[in-house]
Image (spheres, rainbow, N blue to C red):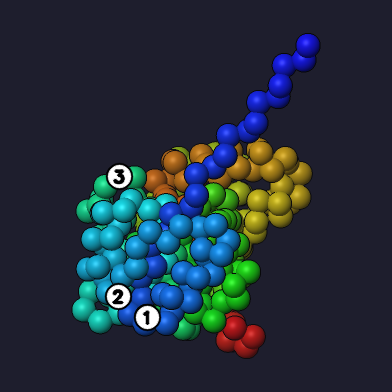
Amino acid sequence: MTEPSAEPPTEPPLRVVIADDQALVRTGFGMILAADGIDVVAEAADGDQAVEAVHRTRPDLVLMDIRMPGTDGLEATRRILSGAVPDPPPRVVMLTTFDLDRYVYAALTAGASGFLLKDVTPEHLVAAVRLTRAGDALLSPAITRRLVERFVAHGSGTAALHRDLSVLTPREREVLQALGGGLSNAELAALFRLSEATVKTHVARILAKLRLRDRAQAVVVAYETGLVVPRSGEGDAGL
């Protein structure tokens, strides 16, 4: 008699906090996520409420409006990711109206995993939240690259992410340089003729050696260390 096959373990529902000073945004995003089986465990109207909600509910991810009255999203993100809430901290994705926003760049430097425009489609919102939980993809890589290029080239006024790249192997430096160009794991695998599993191993080692939270910070480091040089004279067309 054949043994019944064991069912694969089910992944626990994704737990999300939504922080935005507009109730309509919180409600709309919450309905979209809930319809896809994602648990919205708390809502917050300002940064202080967001930090308290994270401490109380320990979510996997926070959708954080960058501009809120009182304590804004940037300061709340810094507090959440600096260990002011239980460890490990959740991933944070910034919500913004403008893609080329120096506050978004500052949030990426502080450890945010990426950003979304508030006019994001429901499908993209759900996909981005799930990808960010997995830590396997940088949100809006092309726009993020242009964002980083602008504020590295013209001075961001934010604390830089200085890291010693000498701890990396030559291959890891090559992978980091390609990450700075916004390449996905599949694109990295094709470029270096490696399996995606090997690429993921390289990326994980880069993040560990440079003490980075995720790929978003890796892109910032690639530019701020000069491994990737901002392209001069790049315009804003098509952003």
Residue 211 makes an appearance in the image: yes
Camera-side mark, 1 or 3? 1
**Quadrant in which residue 170 is drawn:** top right
Is 113 left or right of 181, judged from the image as shown? left
Residue 153 makes an appearance in the image: no
Camera-side mark, 2 or 3? 2
Residues at discs 2 and 1 in contact (Cβ within 8 Å): yes
Q: Quadrant of the N terminus?
A: top right
Task: Please state which of residues 114 and 236 is positioned toward the viewer in this rendering.
Answer: 114
**Quadrant in which residue 156 is drawn:** bottom left
The residue indicated by pointer 3 is 87
Disc 1 packing (10 Å; few <14; some 14–19; many ≥20): few
Is 114 left or right of 141, judged from the image as shown? left
The percent position of residue 238, horizontal first and vertical second, equals 64, 85
Name the residue type under label 3. Asp
The residue indicated by pointer 2 is 45
Q: Earlier in the sequence, mark 1 or mark 3?
A: 1
The residue indicated by pointer 1 is 23
Task: Please state which of residues 149 and 190 is positioned toward the viewer in this rendering.
Answer: 190
Name the residue type under label 1. Ala
Vertical arrangement, residue 9 with respect to residue 217, above or below: above
Residue pictured at 26% horizontal, 47% vertical:
86
Q: Earlier in the sequence, mark 2 or mark 1?
A: 1
- How many angstroms separate mark 2 from mark 1 (CA)? 8 Å
- How many angstroms separate mark 1 from mark 3 (CA)? 29 Å
Task: Please state which of residues 119 and 224 is positioned toward the viewer in this rendering.
Answer: 119
The percent position of residue 155, horizontal first and vertical second, equals 38, 76
Disc 2 packing (10 Å; few <14; some 14–19; many ≥20): many
Is 49 left or right of 120, judged from the image as shown? left
Q: How many numbered marks appear?
A: 3
Name the residue type under label 2. Ala
